[in-house]
Amino acid sequence: MREHQPSEARPTLFVNARLVCPATGRDETGSLLVDGGQIVELGPKVPPASRAETVDCRGAVLAPGLVDLGAFMGEPGAEHRESIETASLAAAAGGVTTIVARPDTTPPVDSPEIVDHLKRRARDTASVHVHPMAALTKGLEGREMTEVGLLLDAGAVAFTDGPRSVANARVLRRAMTYARDSGALICCHVEDPDLASGGAMNEGEYASRLGLPGRPSTAETLMLERDVRLARLTGARYHANVVTCSESLEVLARAKKGAPNITCGTSIAHLTLNENDVGEYRTFFKLAPPLRHEDDRIALVQALADGLIDVVCSAHDPQDVETKRRPFAEAEDGAIGLETMLAAGLRLVHSGDVPLHRLLAAMSTKPAELLGLPGGALKVGAPADLIVFDPDAPWVLDATKLRSKSKNTPFDQARFQGRVLRTVVAGRTVYAYG
């Protein structure tokens, strides 16, 4: 494999491609022409263009680039775990053309100045699009809301306290009211901090057998129930970041009836792994929220297929060796996921559980729509943020070759079927396999 620096944005004609667009329902063999960073023509028959570079896709899928809602980027304050540059390299290799960065940095992203700093750093060092989310409360402390209007003006695309829930319902209601008036999206971690406190993995029989303290799924369901009620009360645009259990899906099924302002997501790890994968205290499987029972995983997969779950994210959370090489209960939560999100998701396609269009919609079209970002569709005039991937190519993950600074992947030595061959951002190739 070799890394490719961004090429000049010359006209490019992709031929012999399987054009797959979840936004329009397109799924056909054809060609696509890119010029000036945009899609200018596509369909079964696209005539050759002068000066255009021709890329033969050889039957591989050509689809909109992925939009990852809520990855930890490391900057500022945790560059030893990840940087904007290394995260963007990992994203490009995984088919992610847009990263939406969490605000739980040091200092947190709770002022326009920090938003501006991140945008400038991304412009200078990132090979994919990077958009910052701003903190919902000052210092991520859950006591006082941030300046929503000023942060929006600075370029924040959504508001969240990252891995922390806003425990004070009055503060969250006030924030939702302000966000509603400005059209901002509020993204919340749904887990009661008191009920979840001290837990190392999913509460249940398996945790008891390992002698580990549990985090009950009720901690998630209770917080989610409160949040969706506040969202219906205020009319704010509300997104539950990562739901993980069947009880939460029941809450969402009720809450979303007649409430288009309420959406939810889950992580690729919770869709493809369960609590049994913890095995003999394998800390790379220690996540927050924790991996749940297999019955919960199956329910999540069905909810994704049915459209109840709107978004699938990587939940990219790099941790260094020192914080993971500890006893399980003391190890930090989190796993990296930018580079493996699509490959792991294709497991659900190959098993027949989730159609390819539905998976791509949750990884691309819907997050772009929620955030008001361009992309997520193959159509004339849309940005040329594209991925070419072979859904059937077999490969084995070698964690040492991942582009993230941290290597805490739960998929080390995993067998995948489906590989990204090319990633294009604004008409420029930022990654090519081969």
Image (cartoon, helix red, strand yellow):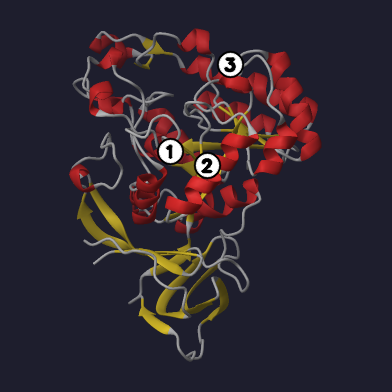
Say which label, 2 or 1, has the lower sequence index: 1
Q: Which residue is mark 1?
A: 73
Residue type, label 3: Glu
**In what element is the residue under mark 1?**
loop
Q: Quadrant of residue 231?
A: top right
Distance, label 2 to label 1, CA atoms, is: 10 Å
Residue located at (63% from left, 72% from top) = 381
Residue located at (81% from left, 35% from top) = 181
Residue type, label 2: Leu
**In what element is the residue under mark 3?**
loop
In the image, 64 versus 254, the foreground residue is 64
Query: Do the numbered discs 2 and 1 sit on residues whose CB atoms are within 8 Å?
Result: yes
**In what element is the residue under mark 2?**
helix
Q: Quarter holding the C terminus?
A: bottom left
In the image, 217 versus 40, the foreground residue is 40
Mark 3 crowdedness (10 Å alpha carbons): few <14, some 14-19, many ≥20: some
Where does residue 52 sit, x and y in percent of width and height? 45, 85
Res 118 label: 2
Where does residue 136 sit, x and y in percent of width and height? 63, 27
